[in-house]
Each structure stands twice: as C-alpha cells, then as structure tokens.
C-alpha cells in the first residue's frame, strides 16, 4: 500500500454483534498491518448487548487486543458521517438474508458463513473450543485477504475477490 493510500475499511455483520463479527473485527485489525481497518455491527443487537465473554477470552488468549470492542447496530454505519466501507462481509446466515441498509459509497459485499460458537452446548472448555475453532477458521480466510496484492483489492474487483475467498 502506498503511503498516501487509506486503509481498506471492512465491516463484519452478524445478527447480534456479540460473537462472530466481534471476532472478525478484532482479528482483522490485528492482522491488517495498517492496510485494513475493521469494524463490526449487528442487524438487531439486543438491548444492552455485550460481546460474548468467551469470545473475548479466546481473543485475549490469542494475544489479540479487545480494547474498544462493543456490540452495536449496523445503523451506526449507514449514516453519512460514518466511516465509508470498502467491503462488507456477513458472517452469519441470518444477517446475509436480511435487507441491509443502503451503505454510503456502495461497498463490495461478500458472505462468509460461520456456525455460531455461542450456541454450543457442553462444558465450559467445549464452549471455549467452539470459539477457538471459529477464530481459527476466520484467521485462515483473513490471511488470504490480507495477503492479496493491491490490484485484487481495487474497488472494481474487490467484490469478486472477497466472494472467491469463501471457497478457501
């Protein structure tokens, strides 16, 4: 990325913005090396929704900062004064099927579905393992995204590029 080029803004969406989208936001901000700025939001976060504590624990255990992570509505990103997104990625099937706001700048979109780690049963360790597995799966896909050359991140080809990463 040239010194004058702005980072690529990426918004991760899920329904409640408490698990998958939070993991993806923190992970891409950690991996993005200044080329990417990640955000997350939910289509319908619950009142007083907070990030899932197991998700935060998995991030901390992986050495990824959880500073500033909070659950929020996608409405925060559909206003004219919000950061303009270059890429919006839904990470749950529910959010992918919903009618989304009109995003300023008409960003590229992709769907990268992941099972909800917060819906697992079992012991605390088994629940934590579900979050670790989700984080690992996201990391593999995000490694591909952050390693893409600049020409694959250009606005004209970004949507196709992001959608092709789902097969990896």
Image (cartoon, grey):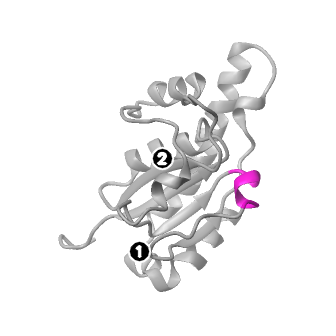
Depth check: give the residue in front, 15 or 148.
15
Asked whether 94 falls inside the magenta stretch, the response is yes
Report the mark closest to the observer, 1 or 2. 2
Which secondary structure lies at badge 2? helix
Q: Earlier in the sequence, mark 1 or mark 2?
A: 2
Q: Residue at (38%, 33%) from the top-left corner?
A: 65
Q: Quadrant of the C terminus?
A: bottom right
Residue stretch in magenta? 92-98
| Residue 42 on image: x %, y % | 60, 47
Q: Is residue 161 above or below residue 28?
A: below
For mark 2, does the 10 Å Cα neighbourhood hold few (<14), some (14 to 19), or many (20 or more) residues?
many
Farthest residue toward the bottom?
Answer: 156
Q: Quadrant of residue 63?
A: top left
For mark 1, does the 10 Å Cα neighbourhood hold few (<14), some (14 to 19), or many (20 or more) residues?
few
Q: Which residue is mark 2?
A: 25
Position of 111 with respect to 70 (left or right) is right
Asked whether 134 falls inside the magenta stretch, the response is no
């Amino acid at each position: 990325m040239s010194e004058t080029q702005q980072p690529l803004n990426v918004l991760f969406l899920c329904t409640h913005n408490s698990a998958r989208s939070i993991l993806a936001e923190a992970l891409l901000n950690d991996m993005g090396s200044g080329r990417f700025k990640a955000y997350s939001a939910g289509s319908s976060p619950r009142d007083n929704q907070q990030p899932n504590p197991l998700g935060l624990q998995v991030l901390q255990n992986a050495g990824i900062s959880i500073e500033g992570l909070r659950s929020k509505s996608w409405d925060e990103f559909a206003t004219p004064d919000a950061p303009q997104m270059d890429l919006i990625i839904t990470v749950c099937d529910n959010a992918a099927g919903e009618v989304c706001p009109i995003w300023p700048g008409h960003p590229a979109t992709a769907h990268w579905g992941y099972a909800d780690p917060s819906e697992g049963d079992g012991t605390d360790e088994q629940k934590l393992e579900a979050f670790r597995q989700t984080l690992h799966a996201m990391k593999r896909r995000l490694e591909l995204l952050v390693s893409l050359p600049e020409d694959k991140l250009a606005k004209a080809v970004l949507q196709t590029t992001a959608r092709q990463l789902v097969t990896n």
